[in-house]
Amino acid sequence: MAIRNVIFDLGGVLIDWNPRYVYKSVFNDEEKLDYFLNNVCTGEWNSQMDRGRTFDECIKELQAQHPEFKDEIALWKTRWTEMLAGTITQGIELFNAVKKSGKYTMYALTNWSAETFPYAYKHFPFLNDFEGIVVSGEEKMTKPDKGIFLTLFERYHLTPEECLYIDDNEKNLETGRSRGMVTISFADPEEGYKKALKRLNLKN
């Protein structure tokens, strides 16, 4: 079946988001930084906000569990915008190539807090070029859950086998494949960029 739609993940594919950009100057010690992100403000904890819980609620709860890091935890909200370092070059080049070709319809499927996504939408104008965007925080479910993929298909009347899905997270890609999508990993942006261009028959 021919590919008709390209589904982009945002963070890690098009947008460079990483809490290390904030906390590397806070701790100024790689070992302490790793401990904090692996044991306190973890990816699992952050995913609660991606599922729709508020920053204030999650931060207050975590501060109670780790009072010794109360101030550092608070920065997750007050300095969140500094976790964004702009765009990922290869991802944007791929996005522009797909857009320029006019052959495919583009959508986004992202794990992102409903609280902070309006900021992203305002500061990354290319998001307006998507035909549709499914945001986990608005749907109250995250990738790799199958439900959010079904929401994408049903809302925009997409046939999974006609979709090329690009993500940097292998678990998300596994779910995409289990739903019938063609997938490309962007864990290595340069490699992912080249593979996507080839699969879509586009020139770089």
Image: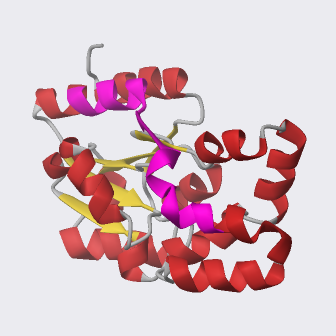
The quadrant where residue 48 appears: bottom right
Quadrant for the C terminus in the image: top left
Q: Is residue 157 found left or right of 138 in the rendered image? A: left
Q: Say if 178 sits above or below 33 in the image.
A: below
- x then y, percent, for residue 29: 84, 38
Tell me: 104 left or right of 22. left
Q: Is residue 97 left or right of residue 129?
A: right
Q: Is residue 204 left or right of residue 44?
A: left
Asked which quadrant contains residue 178, the reply is bottom right
Identity of the residue furthest to the top in this view:
204
Residue 44 appears in the picture as rendered: no
Q: How many marks?
A: 0
- Look at the picture and state if 40 lies above or below 80: below
Residue drawn 55% across the image and 52% down it? 173
Closer to us: 149 or 123: 123
| Residues rendered magenta in the picture | 74-96
Residue at the extreme left of the image, as rendered: 102
Residue 8 in view of the camera: yes
Please name the colour scheme applied to the rendered image: secondary structure
Seen from the viewer's position, the closer of residues 131 and 80 is 80
Give me the residue at 18% from left, 44% from top.
125
**In the image, what residue occupies the spot 70% across and 61% down?**
72
Would you say the magenta stretch is mainly helix, strand or loop? helix
Q: Position of residue 188 (x, y in %)?
A: 58, 28
Q: Provide residue 74's location: percent of width, then percent of height.
A: 62, 68
The correct choice, above or below, for 134 with respect to 66 in the image is: above
Give 105 or 10, whichever is nearer the viewer: 10
Q: Residue at x 13, y 27 (%)?
A: 100
